[in-house]
Amino acid sequence: MSTTGRGLHGRVLETLGPAITAGEYPPGSVLRTDELAQRFDVSRSVMREAVRVLESMHLVESRRRVGVTVRPEAEWNVYDPQVIRWRLAGADRPRQLRSLTVLRSAVEPVAAGLAAKYATAEQCAELTRCALGMVAHSRGHQLEGYLVHDIAFHRVVLNASGNEMFARLGDVVAEVLAGRTHHEIMFEDPDPAAVTLHVQVAEAVRTGDAARAEHLTREITVGALQELDILAP
Amino acid sequence: MSTTGRGLHGRVLETLGPAITAGEYPPGSVLRTDELAQRFDVSRSVMREAVRVLESMHLVESRRRVGVTVRPEAEWNVYDPQVIRWRLAGADRPRQLRSLTVLRSAVEPVAAGLAAKYATAEQCAELTRCALGMVAHSRGHQLEGYLVHDIAFHRVVLNASGNEMFARLGDVVAEVLAGRTHHEIMFEDPDPAAVTLHVQVAEAVRTGDAARAEHLTREITVGALQELDILAP
DNA sequence: TGTGATGAATAAGTCTGACTTTTTGAACCG
DNA sequence: CGGTTCAAAAAGTCAGACTTATTCATCACA
C-alpha cells in the first residue's frame, strides 16, 4: 500500500515525515543535515535527498548557514498524498478526516453531476455493479466487503467526471472511507438510507440526470458530515 | 513569485519539470541520471536530488538497472503548486485553466457558505474592502487593479472558511484569475453583474447568510465557466 | 521445445572526503 | 552608536570509488 521505503532516503522519510507533520518539531525549529545524517546513520548525500523531498512538500526550508527550518503548517502541501498519509497517521487524525470530509462534500456532488453528463457506458455499468455490491454487503456485519464497493463507487464517480483534479481525489476519498470503517469504530451495519442513495446516484448517472445525481450525492456527503458531528461534536 | 531556482538542482528542475509536464518525454520514456547530469552540466549528486523531487511529485519513477522512467499523466500530483505552475506554463494551458475552474466551481461556493458561518469580524471587513476595491476598478480599463482585489477577495473567502484544504487553494485561484486577465485577452471591463455578485457575497458573509453566500458564489463560478465556453467552445 | 538456473552487464544507490559559497553575527573601528 | 570587516558555520557542490539490485541472454536440463 503505502510507499514502502524505496531506498535509504525513503526509510528516513518514513520516520522524519510523520515526525514533522505531527508537530514534533514546531515551526521555526532548525535541523542540521549532518546531525540528522548521524542520527539516522546514513550518509549526507542520502540525507540531503530526503531533505529535498521534504522541501518539495514545503514542510521545511533549507537555507545556507542556518540549516533546515520547519515551515508553519499553513504552508505545507496538504494535497500531497504522502503528507495526507503522514497526517492521518498522526495524533490529530480526527481533524484531518473532518477537513477532508468537508472537501469531499464540496467536490463529490459536482463530480457526480459531471459524471451524469460524461460517464461512458462502461463506467455506468461499473457504477451499478458497485452499488449492487454495497447492497449485497449492507447487512450482517460485512463491513469490509461494503467498504471495498463503497470506495470503488466513489472512485468511479470521480473518474467519470472527466476532470483530472477530481479524479486524483480518489485516493483521498478512499482514505477517508477506510478511516471511518477502521478507526471510528463502526459496530453496526451502514445506514440503509445511505445505501439507497448510492443506488439512486448510479441510476441518475446512468440516465444522465445531472441535477439529480448532484443532489443525491450532496445528501450522501451531508450524511457523512453529520456522522462526524455525532462522533466528535 | 515562482521559486527562483534555489540551488543548482532547482535550476535543473526549472527546465526538466516543464519539459516532462509538457509531454516532451512521453510516459514510459527512460532517462538516465548520468546522461542528464552531463546534459545539464551538474554533478550526479545534484542530478539525483532533482530526480528525487520529480519522484516525490510522481512525475517519474526511479528503478535500479532500468533508469528514471516518466510516469503517465494520470499519476502526477496535479495539486502540487509547482506542477500546476509548470503545466500552466505549457502548451495545454487552456485545458489546465478549465479543469482548475471546474475545481473552483465545486469548492468556492461551499467555502463561501462556511465563511458566512465562521468568518471573523476582521475577515468580513477585509472582504468588504476587497469588494469595494473591485467596484472602484471595474470601469475604465483598470484591469490590473481589479485583478488584485479579485484575487484578494477569493483568498479571504477561502481562508475564512476555516478549512485548511480550501485555504490552500488560494494560490490556485489566484493563478486562474491572473491567467484569465493576462492570457485570455480581456479588452473590456469586467462584467458588471459579476462585480455586483461579489459585493453581495461580501454582504451575505457579513450577515451570516450561508445559503445566500453559497448560492451567489455558485453564480460567480458558473459565470467563470461560461466565460471559458465562449472562449474555447 | 519449453523451462528454469546461471551469470554477466548495467544503471541506480551509497559512501567518503575535500572543497566552495553564502550568510550571519560579532568584533572592531570610526 | 552605527557602519564595516572578518571569521565561523552550515548548506551546497563535486569527483570517484564502491555496492546492490535487476534485467536479459545464455545455457543446461527435463
Image: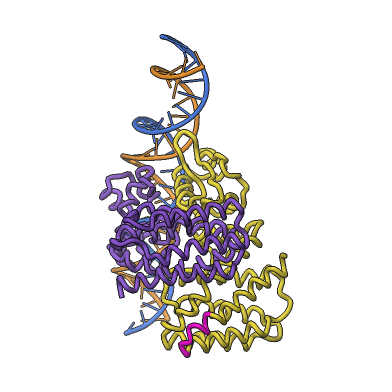
Chain colours: A yellow, B purple, C blue, D orange
Compared across the picture, whether A163 is left or right of A196 comes to: left
In this rendering, the answer to whether B89 lies above or below A116 is above
Which stretch appears magenta?
A: A207-214
Question: Looking at the picture, how far across and down is residue B178, in whole percent?
Answer: 37, 57
Q: Residue at x 30, y 49 (%)?
A: B37
* Quadrant location of the C terminus of chain B in the rendered image: bottom left
Residue B7 visible somewhere in the drawing: yes
In this rendering, the answer to whether A137 lies above or below B152 is below
Question: Looking at the picture, how far across and down is residue A95, in whole percent?
Answer: 64, 60
Q: Which of B215 and B71 lies nearest the eye of the viewer?
A: B215
Q: Residue at x 57, y 71 (%)?
A: A105
Q: Which of B154 and D14 lies nearest the eye of the viewer?
A: B154
Q: Which of A189 and D2 lies nearest the eye of the viewer?
A: D2
Compared across the picture, whether A35 is left or right of D26 comes to: right
Question: Looking at the picture, how far across and down is residue A164, in whole percent?
Answer: 42, 70
In this rendering, the answer to whether C10 lies above or below A175 is above
Q: Residue at x 32, y 60 (%)?
A: B20
Q: Quadrant of residue A230?
A: bottom right
Q: Residue at x 56, y 64 (%)?
A: B204
Dominant SS type (magenta): helix
The magenta stretch spans residue A189: no
In this rendering, the answer to whether B11 lies above or below A147 is above
